[in-house]
Image: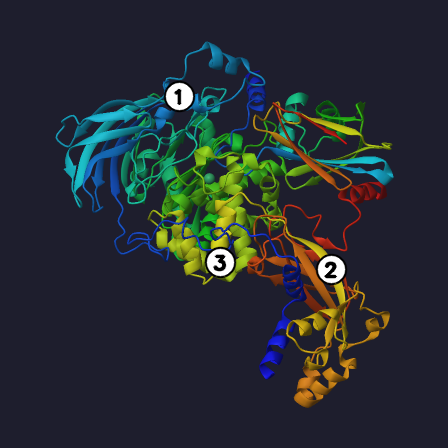
Amino acid sequence: MKKLFFIAISLFLISSSLIAQEVEEKTEPKKEKEGHYNINKFRQLHQELPTPNKEHTASGAPGYEYTQQQVDYKMDIILDDENQKLFGEETITYHNNSKDVLEYLWVQLDQNMRAPNSKTPDIEGEGPGVLYTPGNFTKSFMGKPFPGGFNIQHVKDINGNAIGYMINQTMMRIDLPKPLASGEKFIFNIKWWYNINNYMVDRGRSGYESFPDGNKLYVIAQFFPRLAVYNNVEGWQNMQFWGRSEFALEFGNYQVSITTPKDHILNATGVIQNPKEVFTKEQYKRYSEAKNSFDNPVFIVTPQEALEAEKGKETKTKTWKFYAENVRDFGFASSRKFIWDAMAVDINGKTVMAYSLYPKEGNPLWEEHSTRVVANTLKVYSEHTFDYPYPHATSINAQRQGMEYPMICWNYGRPGPDGKYTERTKSGMIGVITHEVGHNFFPMIVNSDERQWTWMDEGINSFVEILAEYKYDSELFPMSKYPKNITGYMAGDQSRIAPIMSQGDNVFNFGSNAYAKPAAGLFILRQTIMGPELFDHAFKTYAKRWKFKHPTPADFFRTMEDASAMDLDWFWRGWFYTTGYNDIGIKEVKKYHVTDKPTQQAKDLATRYGITIDQLPPALYLVSEDSDEFTEDLKNKKAEDYSILNNYIEENFTPEEKADLKAPKYFYELKFEKPGDLVMPIIVEFEYEDGTKERKQYPAQIWRLNDDEVTKVFHSSKAITKITVDPDEQTADVDLTNNSWPKNTETKFEQFKKNQIKG
Amino acid sequence: MKLKKLYFFLLLSIPLFAFTMHKYYVSLCEIEYVEDQKSIQIILGLFIDDLEFTLNKDAKKNLYLASTEEVQNIDAYYKEYLNNHFKVVVNNKAQNFNFIGKEYDGDIVRFYLEITDIKELKSLQITNTSLFRDFENQQNIIKIKVNKFNKTFYLDKNNPKGLLNF
Ligand SMILES: [Zn+2]
């Protein structure tokens, strides 16, 4: 008998809706349903994630058998400004650190994407253009295609013997004279040249911009045949470069000499080895002294010097010598027009140089902001990852560019010809510099495979960018934009949305898919689901584990869980593997009152267990205001008015304990609905009759047994006047019309119109 | 002369910030018929920088939208653009809308438009060609709400019209 009581009591504690359901099932037997696999949204990602191994472990860290190849380059480059050609010869040392024997090597020839026989234009299915400028028209219909692409002059071994090779579009196979065993290295030499594209006409991540006086500004990258990545994830990553999905590259040391016209100013990946030869005496002095200027940028090349230089046209040349250690790529920018300013940045006691090179057309914006933005970015990113390990970070002003390389990047943003600019031009410029400098961390150092997973560098970088921009100017870059900035995209046409976990060439709305949505997802994780403390530690763990290595998505997902003790598989599944969106609303609010008379539900319960009502234990019951059992007088009764509760308290509590007890007066049953496919925490704000507010956050796991709606009982000593779900728009809820109770009857339109008239 | 030409060229070329693009080419238009007010209420949201690009091109000058430098009579530019690119046919009859106002919200400008004196709604046809000329991938979403009935159209260049019969 005692046992039965116990069961009855514990059943009573279970929400009444469950009992109602069971009753329903009894009276109306359901049709047999088909069986199914586990479709619970909280099931683990065992089927999606690759099996862990000794290189990529189950914890998300590199394993004890982790290896990666190393590739060192020694290059001599000549920039022909007169004819816009680039000539190069490189000696490549390939270190096979893997356990495998290699029969051939794959080398990337990115410039071939703009060769006349490139297949990139062929895969674009587009109708006729809306309008053609005369330039576009002649280019599209009347002229020859731009003669771009690498002209490979030779591929030789260390003794000068020709090596066999085969070119398949943007990939070149080097046929090794004999297989390359584990631990061995192979040295070979490639000579090439190509026509540099005017990227303002032919697009591209590199090329030149031409100014009205004939001066050029070169931003040069993907300019040399570079080794593809070989590892035990993709084998050779030799997926073609179509023009969008970027690069997968090995780390190595670069020794590069670049010959330019004598009046050019140039910076590149790495450190100048011969500054005295390439700078004037004054410039060299400023270059050396800039290392002590921590507060404000100082000029290395002044605006006056740049103005003088752009008037001339030297035929003599000079050679810039660079050395860069442990980088995955190399880029440089060169022009007569460059002004150069510099500022020293203290990264945990180590001095890093922040540089900007820009033509006068970038001012007044650039001298004011660029170098300061570089410095801010290095500081904020270092706090969230690891100390920036390279000696400098350089921002180059290039019209309509936003592209990253180790230590150097190209960034757009210029005022109009009248020197005026809008806040959007300014925030666009600060944003792009933060973003591209930020890429030094992802993917230049945390070296993910961009060809396969755009989001791993763009999405993760766009997330840290939010924090860095906010630090630079919290008014220009308010965080309140996130994550609601992504709801328009997520609520869009499902036939035009791809999951984040898609290869970048195959997605619609590339910017939203690979940049904004992953960034918004990480923002939600940090601010709302994990909290900054747990998130920041786990995120930093990921960055530290994989710096100077090649991480995969699984390494990121696993590390975030491994370092935080939070199971986030549900979040990765919904946000990264599906195109679902979040929509949670409050469907119904019922008010309840306390009574000591058994309700119909209690009577039904007794019947089910074969006992009489008298045999139920002494208890209080909640009566819904809309039920037949409710009577007006209950509204005035408090729980402590009932003797069974009073007696119980008298018998079981000390006076001190009694003083601590709350006096709940109002009981609510809240029914939340979830029309959206994603699961998310429910954040609820209660506003009381006295104007005070209270928040409650229910974890996403509240949806684990019912994916459509859940109910909660909420009690308080004050009457609730308003309930809002997700009041600060923290969960990317795509439809806010179901987020409040009582329902907002005035539409957004009517509110606006009213305010307009008030005026 | 040369400078001017270059400037014009810059205005004409499609922005190509393909590698830093944080956005998508989408507009959202929410339309609600409120029977007791006999009113069709329209909120149309567009990205400011895209609209600015297009309006600058038409105006052949920089309008500096949503900034301290914004031209004085900007609403005239907006009204003209909307009249040319946003068309509403109610019960088979083309209807003009009242321009109630605009609001700037971050990257987005929202236009509030209203058609009054619609006693009964039998059919509603929306044509929205905003930004199609300059943005290849522009998609204009139209969400229509009439009493409890909801319908969404995804308009693009090839399909710029949505028609709803009740
Ligand atoms: Zn990027």
Q: Position of residue B7 (x, y in %)?
A: 57, 22
Q: Is mark 2 within 8 Å of ligand 1?
A: no
The quadrant of the rendering that contains the C terminus of chain A is top right
Of mark 2 and mark 1, the one earlier in the sequence is 1
Mark 2 element type? strand
Q: Chain of mark 2?
A: A
Residue at x 75% of width, y 72% of height: A599
Amino acid type indicated by mark 2: Val
Q: Is residue A673 above or below residue A664?
A: above
Give the mark, 2 or 3, whose residue is nearer the N terminus: 3
Check disc 2 and report the residue beneath it.
Answer: A589
| Viewer can see residue A212 | yes
Quadrant of the rendered structure where residue A64 is?
bottom left
Residue placed under numbered mark 3 in the picture: A535
Q: Whole-Å distance between the Cαs marked 2 and 1? A: 78 Å
Percent coordinates x, y for residue A681 in the rendering? 59, 57
Q: Is residue A296 visible?
A: no
**Which circle marks residue A313 in the picture?**
1
Q: Nearer the viewer, mark 3 or mark 1?
A: 3
Q: Amino acid at mark 1?
A: Lys
The image shows residue A16, relative to residue A489, as above or below, that is below
Please tell me whether mark 2 or mark 1 is closer to you in this view. 2
The image's mark for residue A28 is: none
Q: Are marks 2 and 1 in contact (CB under 8 Å)?
A: no
| Element class at badge 3 | helix
